[in-house]
């Protein structure tokens, strides 16, 4: 691998990201531009941007690494990442758009008329976002380390600084352009080496055959390869987390507001599913090829297989060029996901924690956009500090925990909040707290060193299968016990959520 | 001001109680919930088959390296996409027109 070439490629991605971001700054003027790109993004652009934002370090590096180490079961990561969008689309996308809320805390407050529930949601958004940003920083550290041998802090710092600059400068509008560009960059970077390899060999089937002898149990489903016990439970739990967690990811939801209307939002989702499906064809191929060409990476955790494979297959210039391309794609993944997350977290920090305080301190003498910029800085500092104190868990596993936390908190809040009239405010708060504590306890145990095997490891490693039902149950039981705490405006909320957007009912839009 | 609010509230309650609104909600629920359950079952059954119906899943088709498991696996992506297409077409056809009708009802005459 040639460090100079790879660093040049990474540099180009960084320059392009900042360049497009600055271009966005010139046309980003109002608060609505900052938060939702003035709701004027066409489905195709938006779908590219959504996919670009969604395909993180976990998808670009992590899935291939997990499949390399643990075998075929890990393919569920890619299926689950995709299916989550379908759940989001059919269950919550349309009602949530109609609610007029830009963020999850906004939704919680309008639906449950409670500042307490709102504050819990704000805390959860920051928690989920931090858990999701963490593997992006780890991935960046790993990539720079693989390419140059520099310590992981360097890569993480580069990503953190660029993201804060870009987000603070342009808000959502510039991020949309940046991310649409980055989807196509990522796809090209991941697909090209595979095509070159297949082209050079003419006989890809030979590789698959060599696999049957060497690592038969690895290719079997539910095989416990890589030392994961109770594969059936773990697979189901992972599927649940990914299916129901996507709807609670802060950076995903806000994307549905950048469409001009509900019809466009549906179109966008169809394109997103096609783009994601296309992308996820490639990581497993890296894993399969990695079993043949880089078996030594299995014991190292596997997260670098995508970066190292081109150099292993083609020692020499071809490998260097392809390696540089892949490194550039990986950086696009870190930058785009981190940008989207930072916009979402900053929006919540800005509205719920910062603005009222700034108002008090300065006596109203501040600019709203500056408050957002300070919030963007805070949104990145927290995960960076977490990065410096936590050990490197597998990238895709950490992201899986963020999904589990979202599935155990926002999923019950949204699904029951949208469809169940008898949900009480106390029930909502209790569900968020119980699901949130259970899932984040599991996440903390994992990040700081998981138990070594058997049921404890399975239950803590993939918590969604018990934390999510627990949260749903808590909401239902507590709501039944506290019927007097059903929000007075439930009838109004239900009409708002279920009548078409074109109807001019008061939706309490904050930034119009 | 309070007069406005009262009138608004009555409108909301009327809509909530109106047969058209409950019909719209019911239709949405009757389509979306079974559909969600169905495709979740399909994913979960795939995992079960992989574990317990080993012979069936590793059955080779056409003598090559293509197994039933591989086809079903690819089918996961294809079916996800198909379900989305079905939902979008259904929503365009069955939800949007009635929603439009409801809108005219709330806002008065069509504009």
Image: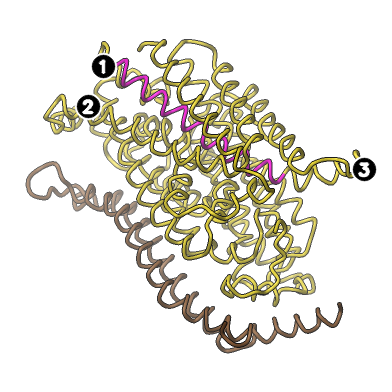
Chain colours: A yellow, B brown
Q: Chain of mark 1?
A: A
- Residue A64: image quadrant is top left
Q: Which residue is mark 3?
A: A363
Residue A58 on image: x %, y %: 46, 35
**Left or right of A278, for residue A161:** right
Helix, strand or loop: magenta stretch: helix
| Residue at (67% x, 74% y) in the render | A505
Query: For residue A498: magenta?
Result: no
**Residue A318 image label:** 1
Same chain for the residues under marks 1 and 3 in the image: yes
Badge 3 marks a residue whose secondary structure is: loop
The residue located at (60%, 66%) in the rendering is A98
Numbered tag placed on residue A196 in the rendering:
2
Q: Is residue A326 magenta?
A: yes
Which numbered disc, 2 or 1, marks the residue that appears first in the sequence? 2
| Furthest residue in direction front, as rendered | A26
For this orientation, the residue located farthest to the left is B63
- Disc 2 and disc 1 in contact, CB within 8 angstroms: yes
Q: Quadrant of the N terminus of chain A?
A: top left
Whether labels 2 and 3 belong to a single chain: the reply is yes
Q: Quadrant of the C terminus of chain A?
A: bottom right
Tell me if residue A434 comes above or below residue A499 in the rendering: above
In front of the other: A495 or A298: A495
Q: At 54% from the left edge and 31% from the top edge, which residue is drawn?
A: A135
Q: Is residue A35 left or right of residue A74?
A: right
Residue drawn at 60 percent across, 48 percent down: A250
Q: Nearer the viewer, residue A98 or A208?
A: A98
Q: CA distance from mark 2 to mark 1?
A: 9 Å
The residues colored magenta run: A319-348
Q: Earlier in the sequence, mark 2 or mark 3?
A: 2
């Amino acid at each position: 691998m040639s460090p100079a070439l790879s660093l040049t490629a990474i540099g180009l991605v960084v320059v392009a990201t900042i360049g497009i971001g600055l271009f966005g700054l010139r046309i980003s003027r109002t608060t609505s531009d900052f938060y939702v790109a003035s709701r004027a993004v066409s489905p195709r652009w938006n779908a590219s941007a959504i996919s670009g934002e969604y395909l993180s370090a976990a998808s670009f590096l992590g899935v291939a690494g997990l499949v390399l180490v643990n075998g075929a079961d890990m393919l569920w990561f890619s299926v689950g990442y995709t299916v989550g969008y379908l759940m989001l689309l059919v269950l919550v996308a349309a009602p949530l758009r109609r609610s007029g809320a830009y963020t999850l805390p906004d939704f919680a407050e309008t639906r449950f008329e409670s500042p307490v529930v709102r504050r819990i949601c704000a805390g959860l958004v920051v928690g989920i976002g931090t858990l999701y940003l963490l593997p992006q920083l780890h991935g960046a550290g790993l990539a720079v380390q693989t390419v140059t041998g520099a310590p992981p802090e360097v890569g993480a710092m580069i990503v953190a600084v660029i993201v804060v600059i870009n987000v603070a400068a342009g808000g959502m509008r510039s991020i949309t352009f940046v991310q649409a560009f980055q989807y196509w960059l990522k796809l090209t970077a991941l697909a090209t080496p595979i095509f070159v390899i297949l082209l050079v060999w003419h006989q890809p089937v030979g590789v698959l055959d060599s696999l049957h002898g060497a690592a038969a149990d690895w290719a079997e489903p539910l095989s416990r390869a890589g030392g994961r016990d109770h594969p059936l439970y773990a697979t189901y739990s992972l599927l649940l987390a990914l299916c129901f967690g996507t709807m609670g990811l802060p950076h995903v939801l806000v994307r549905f507001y950048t469409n001009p209307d509900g019809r466009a939002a549906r179109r966008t989702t169809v394109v997103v599913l096609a783009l994601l499906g296309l992308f996820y064809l490639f990581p497993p191929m890296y894993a399969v090829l990695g079993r043949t060409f880089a078996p030594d990476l299995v014991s190292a955790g596997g997260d670098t297989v995508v970066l190292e494979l081109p150099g292993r297959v083609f020692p020499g210039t071809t490998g260097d060029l392809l390696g540089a391309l892949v490194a550039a794609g990986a950086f696009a993944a870190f930058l785009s996901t981190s940008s989207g997350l930072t916009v979402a977290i900053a929006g919540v920090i800005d509205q719920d924690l910062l603005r009222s305080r700034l108002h008090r301190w300065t006596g109203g003498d501040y600019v709203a956009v500056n408050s957002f910029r300070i919030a963007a800085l805070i949104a990145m500092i927290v995960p960076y500090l977490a990065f410096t104190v936590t050990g490197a868990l597998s990238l895709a596993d950490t992201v899986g925990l963020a999904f589990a936390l979202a599935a155990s908190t926002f999923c019950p809040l949204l699904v029951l909040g949208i469809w169940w009239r008898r949900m009480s405010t106390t029930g909502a708060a209790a569900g968020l707290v119980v699901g949130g504590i259970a899932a984040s306890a599991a996440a903390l145990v994992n990040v700081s060193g998981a138990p070594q095997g058997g049921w404890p490891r399975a239950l803590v490693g993939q918590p969604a299968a018990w934390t999510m039902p627990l949260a749903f149950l808590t909401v239902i039981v507590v709501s039944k016990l506290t019927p007097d705490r059903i929000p007075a405006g439930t009838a109004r909320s239900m009409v708002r959520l279920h009548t078409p957007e074109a109807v001019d009912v008061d939706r309490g839009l904050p930034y119009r | 001001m309070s007069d406005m609010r009262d009138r608004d509230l009555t409108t909301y309650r009327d809509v909530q109680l109106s047969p058209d609104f409950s019909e719209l909600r019911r239709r949405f629920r009757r389509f979306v919930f079974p559909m969600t359950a169905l495709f979740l079952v399909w994913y979960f059954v795939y995992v079960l088959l992989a574990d317990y119906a080993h012979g069936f899943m590793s059955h080779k088709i056409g003598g090559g390296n293509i197994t039933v498991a591989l086809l079903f696996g690819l089918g996961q992506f294809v079916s996800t996409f198909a379900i989305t297409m079905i939902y979008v077409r259904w929503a365009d056809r069955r939800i949007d027109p009635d929603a439009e009708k409801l809108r005219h009802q709330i806002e008065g005459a069509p504009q």
